[in-house]
Image (spheres, rainbow, N blue to C red):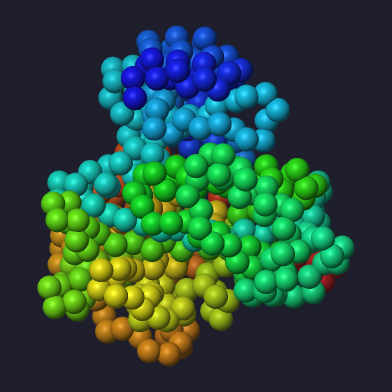
Amino acid sequence: MSHPKFEEYITNNRISEVECLVADMSGTARGKILPPKKFLKGQRNRGLRIPEEIFTLTINGRYVQETQAVSDSAIDIYMEPDVDTVRMVPWYAEPTAQVICDAFHLNDEPVSIAPRHVLRRVLDLYKEKGWRPVVAPELEFYLVKRNPDADYPLEAAVGRSGRKEPGGQAYGIDAANDFDPIVEDIYDYCEAQELDVDTLSHESGPAQLEINFNHGDPLELADQVFLFKRTVRQAALKHDMYATFMAKPHANEPGSSMHIHQSVLDTRTGKNIFSGKDGKPSKYFLNHIGGLQRYLAAALPLCAPNVNSYRRLVPDSDAPTNVHWGVDNRTVSLRVPSSDPANLRLENRVPGADANPYLAFAASLACGYLGMIERIKPSDPVEGSAYRYAHTLPINLDEALDKLNYTKPLKQVLGEKFVEAYQDVKFEEMQNFRRVISSWEREYLLLNV
């Protein structure tokens, strides 16, 4: 889309403001809000400037103090709006547009540590091989009562019935309908933004919902998930509640995941290379699984990016703890849903809902790519519960970051400078976390030690 088409969009929709968005390491929307004339002028001449340090912001909004991944002179970079992503923002009274941007240095080189670029980098590796990945994410979230005091545990939101759900209502129709007003707003907001959401269901936790996306291009779907999370939070606020994508918001309830269904097509023929000519799983498919088995532990910081993420990955909790795979088996990390050969795919059940979608997609596809390139053979598929096997995924963010740091092939695929920046952000967050004294410590140590 050329510059005049931006002007056409703004004129036709009588836009009063434009939000220029980039996703930081945590998947938080950063950027600038501009009047239309300023936007049009800025996107023509590298004028949409932000500091490079945006990509070394921690989850608590602080810049990393010591890092070699960005210039120590706090240089400017510029945002290049991707015109294919321009959409209306449906929750504002004034007509407002939003557009997702790529980040570039002033010499027009891409900012290699920007999450959207990291996903592009992985997709380019597939493209060089004549492959085109396809993904379909499933995203879970909780609706909770407003919680202005962070010292208090979260409580489930109350729907139309006026009563809090006493427990889980997995796939409950009436339980889901209890939140019809907010769900209708979510669907209306998604339709207005052309977000390709499919089905909704009630999950196992109280006021926990899941939205599935239709399968498609990984970059387009990462954009949609990025916008969707913001959309759901806004819809919840309209109904005087919070929506949270924390991996484990409630201590004694299941966590929230972002399962990623993935397959790979031949660019030339459009056929699924996971299926052989005889309709059976191909070597590519098995190698893809093998790559995920070998590299998923090292990729875990991108799929489980926060200290809270690891509270979800525990046995018997609807979440995986190792890297086994199986057919139609929900206890493994790598599930192969029953399907016909044309739709043969793999479901990566490890990523949490708190993951940055650009980085989770990049990590999952990078592991599969390495498996296909290195021709890694998988283990035998598991039948029955995978929880009877050892917990082999890292049990905390420290351990996961160590594995990433010492896994050179994965670092090379993702970009070593990006990995350095990402690790610096996560180490800073862990230092901040360690300074916090928890209620558990006050409860059991205050008078007993």
Q: Position of residue 364 (x, y in %)?
A: 35, 58
Residue for point 70% across, 28% down: 93
Residue for point 31% across, 83% down: 381
Q: Position of residue 435 (x, y in %)?
A: 66, 49
Residue 394 seen anywhere in this rendered image of the structure = no
Q: Position of residue 266 (x, y in %)?
A: 17, 56
Residue for point 29% across, 75% down: 340
Horizontal side of residue 119 vs 160, given as left or right: left
Horizontal side of residue 65 vs 209, given as left or right: left
Q: Is residue 20 or residue 354 the one in the foreground?
A: 20
Residue for point 45% across, 9% down: 41
Q: Quadrant of residue 47?
A: top left
Residue 249 position (above or below residue 91): below
Residue sitting at the far front: 12
Q: Quadrant of residue 296?
A: bottom left
Q: Is residue 71 or residue 83 the one in the foreground?
A: 83
Q: Quadrant of the C terminus?
A: bottom right
Residue 335 position (above or below residue 348): below
How many numbered marks are there? Answer: 0
Horizontal side of residue 97 vs 69, given as left or right: right
Q: Position of residue 217 (x, y in %)?
A: 34, 49
Q: Quadrant of the N terminus?
A: top left
Residue 87 position (above or below residue 142): above
Residue 365 seen anywhere in this rendered image of the structure = yes
Q: Is residue 421 or residue 112 the one in the foreground?
A: 112
